[in-house]
Amino acid sequence: MQANSSDPIVRFENVTKAFGELTVLRNLDFDVAPAEKVTIVGPSGSGKTTILRVLMTLEKPDDGVIWVDGEPLWHQKSGSKLVPASEKHLRKVRGNIGMVFQHFNLFPHMTALRNVTEAPIHVLKMPKGDAEQRAVELLNHVGLGDKLGHYPSQLSGGQKQRVAIARALAMRPKVMLFDEVTSALDPELVGEVLNVIRELAEEGEMAMLLVTHEMGFAREVSDRVVFFDKGRVVEQGPPEQIFGNPQNERTKSFFNAVLRH
Amino acid sequence: MPNEDNLFVKIRNYIFLVIGLLAIGIAIGVELMINPPESPPFDLLPILLRGLAVTIELTLLGAALALVVAIVAGVARASGNIIVRTIVGFYVEVFRGTSILVQLFWIFFVLPLPPFNLSLTPLQAGVLALGLNVGAYGAEVVRGAIGAIPRGQIEASIALNMPPGMMMRRVIIPQAMVRILPPFGNLLIELLKATSLVSLITLSDVTFQGLALRQSVGRTTEVFLLILVIYFLLAYPLTLGVRWLERQRQWAT
Ligand SMILES: Nc1ncnc2c1ncn2[C@@H]1O[C@H](COP(=O)(O)OP(=O)(O)OP(=O)(O)O)[C@@H](O)[C@H]1O
Ligand SMILES: [Mg+2]
């Protein structure tokens, strides 16, 4: 299958994921178009993080197929059948995806600059000079051009998260995943990180899949909001519709609860 | 460039520092052997220093064995296989739970008897006892350091598409290393001090020479004062190195 611009960049096809007795994703069907910005909202424990983690290959789905840019992620083609992916295939397809974590997960033994250059140099085999030049550009872009030589322990939470965003961008993913990337931050640092993401969203060509509790922000940057509960998509649509005029009872009561507190 | 802050540069500097201090110590020792001082108590030094080579040899060989044992046993104990974990755990607990002197006597006096029939030279027995004893403590250090790497580090490496070997080399080992090196330095000091026990199985180390000297010339206070100073001068560069290493941990959250 050759990907063209109208094909989804990400497609979940009947994906199921359980932890023991607890089924977290239930026959999930879900698409993301190239360059689309999708926000996933829903109650705690509904499986939002799990969607991102199976896509990042941090959890293995029990059933179903995930397609990324026209290739199956956890499978590979063998004749007309899909068989479990080899490590090589998994790495190839995974290269399209990047992720920013709630707790940053920066490498504490590397400076900001090296956090950003490490994977481009060693995974993508980029020449060191090119990787450093690009890393400096990216760190400038997230407002940290003066912190290149700082270790993560010398940075604030907001700065760490911006380095983490630069690190993920340096791999040039087609899809970027953000899992509650501001929820570990002090309130006064949330804005600087959201501004960086907002700019990324405006720049455009990269698809973004965000899980967030920042409803105002979701409304602003998303092309589509997905309300997710109990492992299923309950309701989805443009932000004005989902936030302004939700149809489903569960969506309504969720927003009532969120907006009231 | 931030390179002078690089962990590996720091570790290299540390190793140079320790080697440098040891070299100075050895040079002074050799100088004292060649030009023996006349005035007491230093006239006793040349005989004591004859034991220095044995003490250093035991320390280096014991440390080499302990290092290998610590890494193998530590990684095995951190790994998944329950049988391996149990066997290695038994070894670690036995060697940590009994006295090194008793272990030394077992290896030297009991192993040659039936049913073992395994005779070792005093040096072999000394190295084995020191290596296995300190290795058991080292194994716990290694296991703890690997276990202390947060899960998020592994997930970030996967998200950056690193293959497992690269993740181990570039993410896990450097971080485990910072936790491992200071306790390993302390274990090396313990090992150095424990070498004095081998005088009890007839190895002529510094302590052995001192005991012999005391028998022949008396002057007990002077002999033991010199022995004390020799061990201190051997251990002190290591102590400084450990302290310096611990200061380098500020980024290791
Ligand atoms: N590794 C795991 N082992 C067992 N249970 C898990 C695991 N990961 C997640 N779960 C469970 O799966 C359910 C969904 O988790 P998930 O983290 O996807 O929810 P979420 O929608 O992101 O919630 P939150 O808003 O609190 O972050 C939860 O009940 C969680 O406890
Ligand atoms: Mg979550």
Image (cartoon, coloured by chain):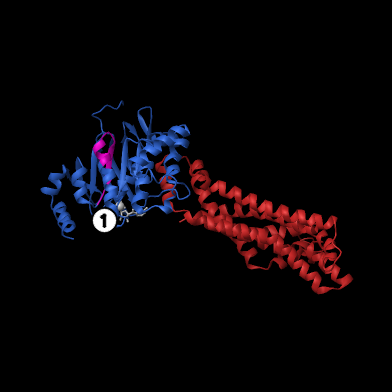
Chain colours: A blue, B red
Image position, residue B27 (x, y; %): 76, 53
Tell me if the residue at label 1 has its CB under 8 Å from ligand 1: yes
Q: Residue at x 38, y 33 (%)?
A: A76
Q: Quadrant of the N terminus of chain A?
A: top left
The furthest residue to the front: B39
Magenta stretch encompasses residue A207: yes
Image position, residue B124 (x, y; %): 77, 56
Q: Is residue A231 above or below residue B38?
A: above
Q: Is residue A21 above or below residue B161?
A: below
Q: Is residue B91 visible?
A: no
Q: Is residue B31 left or right of residue B252?
A: right
Q: Residue at x 30, y 57 (%)?
A: A186
Magenta stretch encompasses residue A202: yes
Front-most of residues B32 and A187 = B32
Q: Quadrant of the C terminus of chain A?
A: bottom left
The furthest residue to the right: B216
Q: State which quadrant residue B140 falls in.
A: bottom right
Residue that numbered label 1 is attached to: A44
Q: Is residue B26 left or right of residue A153?
A: right
Q: State which quadrant residue A80 falls in.
A: top left
Front-most of residues B1 and A19 = B1
Region of the chain picked out in magenta, as a range: A199-212
Front-most of residues B73 and B217 = B217
Amino acid type, residue under disc 1 in the picture: Ser
Give me the chain letter of mark 1. Answer: A
Q: Is residue A163 above or below residue A69?
A: below
Q: Residues within 10 Å of mark 1 (few under 14, many from 20)?
A: few
Secondary structure of the residue carrying tag 1 is loop
